[in-house]
Amino acid sequence: MTEIPTHESERLRILVVDDDASILEIVTTYLDAEGYDVMNAINGAAALALAKRINPDVVITDIRMPEMDGLTLATELKAYDSQIEVIVMTAFSDRDSIIQALRLGVRDYLPKPFDLIELRKSITNLEERHTMRRRDRRLRRDLISQQFMNDIIGQSAQMKAIFDTVLKLADSDCNVLITGESGSGKELIAKALHTSSQRCDRDYVVVDCASLNDNLVESELYGHVKGAFTGAQFNKVGFLEKAHRGTLMLDEINSSSPGFQSRLLRVIEEGEFKKVGSTDTMKVDIRFVSVSNVSLEDRVAEGVFRKDLYYRLNVVNIPVPALRQRPDDI
């Protein structure tokens, strides 16, 4: 049986950013001793890259730093994940910068030098918000899970096993492959995986793989910038960007083209892509839920589906039996 990984932690994850190494060490050591999960970065660029890897709950950053200042960092962090809480530290009585920081959604600011107790109080307030948000999310997930069990008719042992698997996957980000005949309820199960997960308040994006035009697959998947090709009059947000921090449901993945498969594999492996016509790399955090009405393993054997992509998508498999295979539900 596949082991279902989980990653949710009760400890608040904090990222500290300051170009002053001594302040960085003092704050990091203090917060670590207070029981927080703490990491640090010496500048804004390094902090942004680290934040996209560890997904912190709180970022504490200096405002005045070379290369990327704290306000720019806060803007980038909020664009990446609006739920990241930001506290700014500043040694300057810069009223305009503080006002700008608050407009960006920065939760608090601390003038340097500050008492570590004051920092602790600020974090405690954010911790309470974080705990309440997590409780609300769990309550919502419980309600959705109950609704899911009401929506899908079935009291057979097979369906109860599927319900249990969906609930076990609630705290996991692993990719899931759902297989079964048309009309067996695969799409409902796919949506339930999203709405019962930690990503439930993010976008659920559905891609109809069978209808994708191979000539436009890059534009649909990655998006494009204005002027990328003839007719590209506006910037386009692709499926991957829409699904960032959420779930991408790949419907009829068995009907996807070789071109789509190779591009999708690259994104899953690297966690990044470039829009058509752009040189900027976009990093994404996506859970992939794939749906197929035929055996993908058979497609691999036939040479029409990539074996490496199959293993990437099939971390956990949920086979959905047809109604005739579960007579107790008739």
Image (cartoon, rainbow, N blue to C red):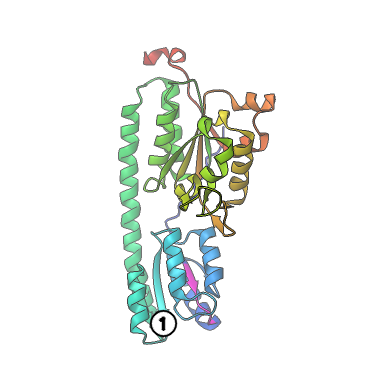
Q: Which residues are magenta?
A: 15-20
Asked whether residue 235 is drawn in magenta, I would say no
* Secondary element at image label 1: strand
Query: Viewer-proximal residue, 251 or 318?
Result: 251
Query: Viewer-proximal residue, 148 or 244?
Result: 244
**Quadrant holding the N terminus:** top right
Left or right: where 229 falls relative to 10: right
Image point (38%, 76%), residue name: 119
- Identify which amino acid the numbered label 1 is placed on: Thr
Q: Position of residue 165 (x, y in %)?
A: 46, 33
Asked whether residue 18 is drawn in magenta, I would say yes
Q: Quadrant of residue 53?
A: bottom right
Hey, which residue is sitting farthest front in the picture? 230
Q: Is residue 226 above or below residue 124?
A: above
Q: Residues within 10 Å of mark 1 (few under 14, many from 20)?
A: some
Q: Position of residue 307 (x, y in %)?
A: 67, 34
Image point (32%, 61%), residue name: 129
Q: Quadrant of residue 258?
A: top right
Q: Position of residue 160 (x, y in %)?
A: 41, 26
Left or right: where 74 falls relative to 275: left
**Quadrant holding the C terminus:** top left
Res 196 visible? no
Res 325 visible? yes
| Residue located beneath label 1 in the image | 90
Q: Position of residue 323 (x, y in %)?
A: 43, 16
